[in-house]
Image (cartoon, rainbow, N blue to C red):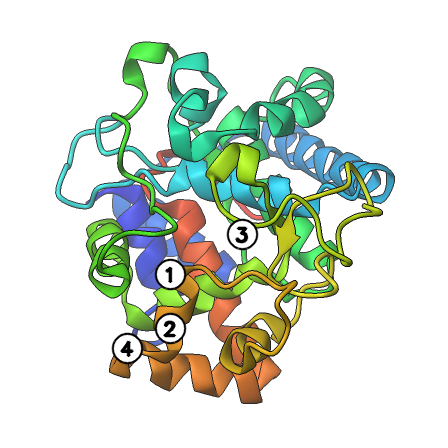
Amino acid sequence: MAVHHLLRRGISGGSPLHPLRGLLLVSQELGWRQASSAAAGDAVAELRGAREDVKQLLKEKSCHPILVRLGWHDAGTYDKNISEWPQCGGANGSLRFEIELKHAANAGLVNALKLIQAIKDKYAGVTYADLFQLASATAVEEAGGPKIPMIYGRVDVSAPDQCPPEGRLPAAGPPSPAEHLREVFYRMGLNDKEIVALSGAHTLGRSRPERSGWGKPETKYTKNGPGAPGGQSWTSQWLKFDNSYFKDVKERRDEDLLVLPTDAVLFEDSSFKIYAEKYAEDQDTFFEDYAEAHAKLSNLGSKFDPPKVVD
């Protein structure tokens, strides 16, 4: 059984396992030999150091949204119907290669790679796959979002020819938004609740028309930054992780806030609407469901050798 399936089983669905217990069961089932305590300690220490450096980067650059997107887009190419690694895609560090960075859906993500490259150079034992997911989860947490039960120890792909084909990531304005979202996310093994919960991360960030073709060049909320000014945000406080995305999409009272077709459909589709309405009313429920969905997404297609938890 693939490692990511074992880990996902312990994080979501049925009775969730505590990450440490889940790791023990995984290692027993696969017959892993434990790494020496010294080697394991060094690896965890490097991950901790990298996390602290990411926190400092976030303070200096206010780059939370693009780091969330970096982790998502590395993981979001996963195809549950392909059993071979790395052909299945997912969180394997392939997004560091130019051929994948040039995919249309990844416009601008070269800037995220440049931001974290110094951290990768400093902590050589941390893989790109781990660093992308660590940066993404840390950005959510530092913006006020929930603590995400992350697992590390991902293996990197080694060459550009191992990158996934273009076209696996979601589009912003497809002809049938609900059908498109389900096609993309069901392929990853995610369900309607997880689609809506993950959509809530749009509470962070802006859409820039020069990159995506969507949004205004600037609004009253983005004209002064922080960071490079411009773009159109989904929420007025677009560096704060909360449930305001759902409230704002539902109300649509502010023309300076962005609502894409794939946002609007969350309150139009009968199944999506159940969760969107709930999250607009109850931030605690949103945080709980989001943390679970983000952790599941971050493990898709990952090969762990061995898995590690950083407390």
Residue at 45% over, 25% down: 95
Q: Which residue is mark 2?
A: 266
Considering depth in this image, is 74 or 292 the residue closer to the camera? 74
Mark 2 crowd level (few <14, some 14–19, many ≥20, 10 Å Cα) = many
Q: Is residue 209 left or right of residue 274?
A: right
Foreground: disc 3 or disc 2: 2
Which mark is first along the chain, 1 or 3? 3
Cα distance between the residues tagged 3 and 4: 31 Å
Mark nearer the viewer, 3 or 4: 4
Which residue type does callout 2 highlight?
Leu
What element does badge 1 sit on? helix
Q: Quadrant location of residue 239?
A: bottom right
Near mark 4 (Cα within 10 A), the count class, few <14, some 14-19 or many ≥20, is some
Q: Gap between marks 2 and 1, in whole Å?
A: 7 Å
Which label's residue is closer to the chain start, 3 or 2? Answer: 3
- On residue 262, which mark appears? 1
SS class, disc 3: loop
Residue 163 x/y as whole percent: 32, 21
What secondary structure is found at the residue carrying circle 2?
A: helix
Toward the viewer: 57 or 244? 244
Residue type, mark 4 in image: Asp
Question: Percent position (x, y) of residue 36?
Answer: 55, 29
The label shown at residue 150 is 3
Residue for point 31% across, 39% down: 301
Tell me the amino acid under the disc marked 3.
Met
| Quarter of the image where one finds residue 31 | top left
Residue 269: numbered disc: 4
